[in-house]
Amino acid sequence: MTKKLALLTAILFSWTVSFAAVITVPTDQPTFQAGIDNAVNGDTIIVSPGVYTGNGNRDIDFQGKAVVLISASGPENTVIQCEGSLSEPHRAFFFHSGEDTTSVVSGFSIRGGLAFDESGGGLLAKDSSSPLIINCKFSDNSAHIFFQGILPGLGGAVGSERSDIQYQNCVFENNTSGAGGAVDIFYGSPRFSNCLFLNNVSLSHGGFEGSGPGHSGAIGCWFGSPILLNCIFSGNIAKRYQPEPIQSQRASGGAISFFGSSGQVTNCTFFENIAEASLTENGAGGAIYCHQASPIINNCIIAYSKESESIYCRDTASHPIVMCSNIFGNEGGDWVGCIASQAGINGNFSANPYLCNADSGNLYLRASSPCAPNNNSCSQLIGALPVDSACLDCCFDPTGNIDCDGGQTADISDLTVFIDHLFITLTPLCCPDAANTDGTGTTDISDLTALIDYLFISLAPTAPCQ
């Protein structure tokens, strides 16, 4: 009897699989929505390269179906142009019918979405809908609300409301809102793996307390527990509120803000995120801001935040736990405030992470980086990216060989290259560490001054390589 039941099950399964259809857009069906409307569970919809606009190619609804929607040629060649506006808001996808990870979206660029009085300019998942989003790029999407006028809203790119949606290998770039420049989370445990958050912005906004500064340049999380694995946050900004030239309020959470939340942040790299300062005080948390929140932060690099410290806690109820992490070069301080007691314990430290070439966006590690597994007490990778074997250590004492010509000391050629980099063509340096002539860990006009002093004035040696 058991063998007969197993055989019958196998036959039924093979019969179901054999009838799974492949639908092509626009060959078989003219639009994304028409493809889904004509699909059943188990079907695959393949979309040809192109730029897709108009009804049927935006506000796409999976209707709870377990189907795979995939581009034939990836996000570079397959674009959903939402063409959203304040008068006609549109996003790419709306999940609200209990979808799970058998509902898949893979390989699209999503641009120009706009949400009004809702979160998620490019995509909204709510009411326990938790699809799987793979290899998608969300760019130039925005969210707005009406609060004594039209103001920036929540979740410029995506909204996650009571959802466990999963994002894999996705890019969030140049999205804007008032809170959560890229992502708004309200309850739920969404998961982000190998994602890039680049140059997203939270503007001054209207909200629970009226107009005020922006917070959560990339991700804003309310009462949720997101999981972030191997993600990069770079150049995200929370903007200060400055209604008049002599007044301003500082921003908070250049990359992430947690409100009443937990969450896990593991093997992530935070680089040059900004919570803008007011006229009188630093911003609050260039990388992470906590309000009654206690996220767990493991194996992360938090480096070179601008106008603010690395992690900020608004209250004594916030207790972020940090382990095996390198926090370095943040303008408002590294291991300060609510994380001060965790410096030097549990594998935590503060040292130049020796990124390959951060000025040109290469955030891989050099072989000598303390974040490489062989170079730290945790014996684990710290940050999102491993050592790049093609990235050779280029700085040899003393600093100053900016043109990488093999010379052991600085000369006029190095000065020329440095001036060109800072003021003329802005060409990335071949070895940024060699330009750190003042030893502060960053490359700026102060280093140029130190180089000129060495060459023409005091002849005092430049700083050693860090």
Image: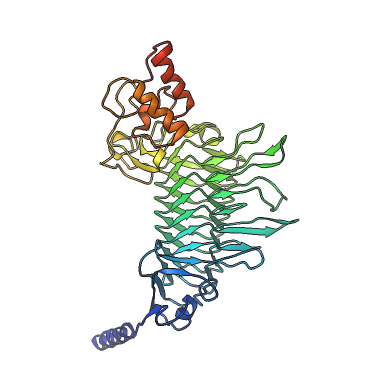
Tell me where residue 395 appears, x and y as whole percent: 31, 28
Where residue 398 sits, quadrant-wise, is: top left
Question: As rendered, which of 273 and 132 lies closer to the eye?
Answer: 273
Where residue 18 sits, quadrant-wise, is: bottom left
Colour setup of the view: rainbow
Indicate whether 83 appears above or below 331: below
Q: How many marks?
A: 0
Q: Residue at left 59%, top 51%?
A: 260
Residue 310 in sight from this viewpoint: yes
Where residue 69 sits, quadrant-wise, is: bottom left
Tell me where residue 34 appears, x and y as whole percent: 48, 80
Question: As rendered, which of 248 and 359 lies closer to the eye?
Answer: 359
Q: Residue at left 51%, top 70%?
A: 53
Q: Residue at left 54%, top 32%?
A: 332
Specify the quadrant that holds the C terminus.
Answer: top left
Tell me where residue 138 appears, x and y as whole percent: 48, 59
Tell me where residue 37 appears, x and y as whole percent: 48, 82
Question: As rendered, which of 254 and 403 lies closer to the eye?
Answer: 403
Furthest residue in direction right, as rendered: 148
Indicate whether 423 appears above or below 102: above
Specify the quadrant that holds the N terminus.
Answer: bottom left
Residue 350 in sight from this viewpoint: no
Furthest residue in direction top, as rendered: 458
Indicate whether 192 appears above or below 432: below
Question: As rendered, which of 248 and 160 lies closer to the eye?
Answer: 248
Indicate left or right for 283 with 304 as reference: right
